[in-house]
Image (spheres, grey):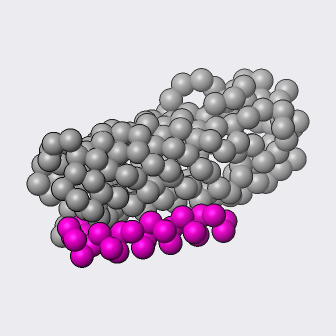
Amino acid sequence: MKEFRLFVITVFVFSVSGIHAQGLHLGLKAGANVAQLSGRAFNDGFQWGFSAGAFAEVNLTSKWGVQPELLFSQNQTQTANGFEEIIPQGYNNLKVTLNYLSIPILLSYKPIPVLSLQIGPQFGILMNPGVTVANSTANAFKSGDFAMVGGAQVNLGPVKAGVRYVYGLTNLNNVNNADSWKTQNFQIYMGLRIF
């Protein structure tokens, strides 16, 4: 947690210095998540969810910037038919919804003004930690998720549209070490810069 705080403070300091040079813009965005959890415990295949929140654009130069965001992000999945073989007393074919407060902090590069290429880390805080997938446990998923994000965004004046791939690096399995559960997520979104 200390590393996360240090990272946020560092990004904030660099962002504030860039505000004076190029400006700060804020906006709102919403879109769809197409996500899955990897591992033998869950069915293969992506399922739809949604995301919504706010973003900031901190332009450091005409080509480089930082785009921190604060998003509600919903990931849905389903336990596999043989889930009880991996997690004792587990529920087979159970639909699971994980709601995260996601905080991506993206480095943004504009090769041309209408296009931004983005990459960076994302921190996720599980907002519904009591998700149950078995009789024997109430907190089956770890409360935090660290992921890497990459994508592209089209900038048409105040209107933003983009696609991203989010790859989870944290094993979310809080029950046992029998299976590694990691997120994979495609995001499609629209945004509006409000100032």
Asked if residue 164 can be seen in this view, the reply is yes
Asked if residue 92 can be seen in this view, the reply is no
Residue 25 lies, with reference to residue 90, above or below; the image says below
53 part of magenta stretch: no
Quarter of the image containing the C terminus?
bottom left
Residues 96 and 115: in front is 115
Residues 22 and 35: in front is 22
Q: How many marks?
A: 0
> Measured from the top left, where is residue 28 in percent x and y?
29, 61
Which residue of the protein is positioned furthest toward the left in this rendering? Answer: 157
4 part of magenta stretch: yes
**Residue at (61%, 57%) from the top-left corner?**
126
Q: Main secondary structure of the magenta part?
A: helix
**Within the image, what quadrant is residue 111 found in?**
top left
**Residue at (66%, 44%) from the top-left corner?**
170
> Measured from the top left, where is residue 179 in percent x and y?
78, 32
**Residue at (43%, 62%) from the top-left corner?**
70
Q: Is residue 148 left or right of residue 151?
A: right
**Residue at (23%, 59%) from the top-left corner?**
61
Residue 153 lies, with reference to residue 80, above or below; the image says below
> Measured from the top left, where is residue 133 in percent x and y?
75, 43
Residues 36 and 170: in front is 170
Quarter of the image containing the N terminus?
bottom right
Q: Is residue 17 left or right of residue 104?
A: left
Residues 110 and 94: in front is 110
Magenta stretch bounds: 1-26
> Measured from the top left, where is residue 26 in percent x and y?
26, 67
